[in-house]
Image: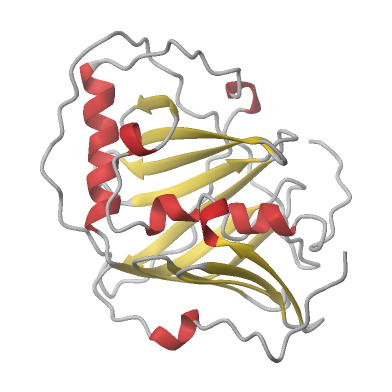
């Protein structure tokens, strides 16, 4: 594993990009043995088939234990082929993920994160469309991620500071849009499926930041969001797995308010 020297301030943008990335904890647990990501399938030209939208599934009242995040094989991040195409099955799988994301209006649950330095942390998250999300880490980590529909704040309660970013500049918009067609609205470079996961990888190129990737993974059987992995321009992965999902519980609007008065902006 690569040895990193990470500070919350230095990786604030990565934090925003992955909902909760790059934050280390003094109580971090040992990372489980990584499992390889599904291998890419061959692609050819075909017409897109959009299946009907599916109703979001919830786990109900039964609380599930934290899952073991699937750590993707870092060798998967090969340069994208600009002439790549997808076959009918891949298009159908991407459409299934698009319809699932579009059907969600609110979502809450728990998450477990594996950072690029191998640290493992947990917490709770809340989503309300359009554009609102909150990720709250379990103690002792003092970080919270809050998006109010237009801005995203990376807040450090211990230092009473926060970094503010436009929501439009983070991959959050892909999960927080009212409706999204991944193949049309994003630069999809990979669609794979096996008996466990459907995986869609999106690539973004930004002039000042570089090229990053977001890999979304949903369950092949239940169609629910399972995890995502953000790869930063330096090639470091942050994986966030979600569980105990509830798409019916009403989320308090106050959770998404950014406090601009009690928190200062770090210099630089």
Residue lying furthest left: 52
Image location of residue 160, percent across then percent down: 77, 84
Residue at the spot x=53%, y=47% of the render?
69
Would residue 100 be found to the left or right of residue 38 on screen? left
| Residue 222 can be seen, yes or no | no
**Where the C terminus falls, by quadrant?**
bottom right
**Where the N terminus falls, by quadrant?**
top right
Image location of residue 131, percent across then percent down: 42, 65
Q: Above or below — where is 35 with respect to 40?
A: below
In this view of the protein, which residue sits in the foreground, 86 or 263? 263
Q: Above or below — where is 81 with respect to 244?
A: above
Would residue 55 be found to the left or right of residue 90 on screen? left
Residue lying furthest front: 207
- Classify residue 200 by image quadrant: top left
| Residue 30 can be seen, yes or no | yes
In this view of the protein, which residue sits in the foreground, 174 or 24? 174
Image location of residue 247, percent across then percent down: 27, 68
Q: Above or below — where is 14 with respect to 254?
A: above
Image location of residue 14, percent across then percent down: 68, 52
């Amino acid at each position: 594993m690569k040895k990193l020297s990470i500070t919350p301030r230095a990786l604030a943008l990565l934090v925003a990009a992955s909902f909760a990335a790059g934050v280390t904890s003094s109580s971090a647990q040992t990372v489980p043995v990584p499992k390889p990501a599904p291998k890419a399938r061959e692609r050819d030209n075909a017409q897109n088939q959009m299946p009907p939208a599916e109703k979001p599934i919830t786990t109900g009242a039964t609380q599930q234990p934290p899952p073991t995040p699937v750590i993707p094989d870092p060798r998967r991040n090969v340069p994208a082929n600009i002439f790549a195409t997808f076959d009918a099955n891949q298009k159908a799988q991407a459409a299934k993920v698009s319809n699932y994301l579009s059907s969600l209006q609110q979502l809450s649950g728990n998450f477990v994160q594996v950072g690029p330095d191998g640290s493992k942390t947990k917490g709770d998250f809340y989503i309300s469309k359009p554009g609102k999300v909150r990720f709250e880490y379990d103690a002792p980590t003092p970080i919270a991620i809050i998006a109010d529909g237009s801005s995203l704040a990376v807040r450090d309660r211990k230092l009473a500071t926060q970094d503010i970013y436009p929501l439009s500049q983070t991959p959050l918009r892909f999960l927080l849009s009212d409706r999204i067609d991944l193949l049309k609205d994003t630069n999809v470079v990979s669609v794979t499926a096996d008996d466990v996961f459907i995986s869609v990888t999106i690539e973004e190129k930004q002039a000042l930041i570089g090229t990053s990737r977001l890999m979304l993974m949903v369950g092949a059987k239940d169609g629910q969001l399972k995890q995502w992995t953000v790869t930063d321009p330096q090639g470091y992965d942050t994986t966030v797995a979600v569980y105990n999902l509830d798409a019916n519980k009403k989320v308090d609007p106050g959770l998404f308010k950014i406090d601009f008065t009690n928190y200062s902006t770090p210099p630089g």
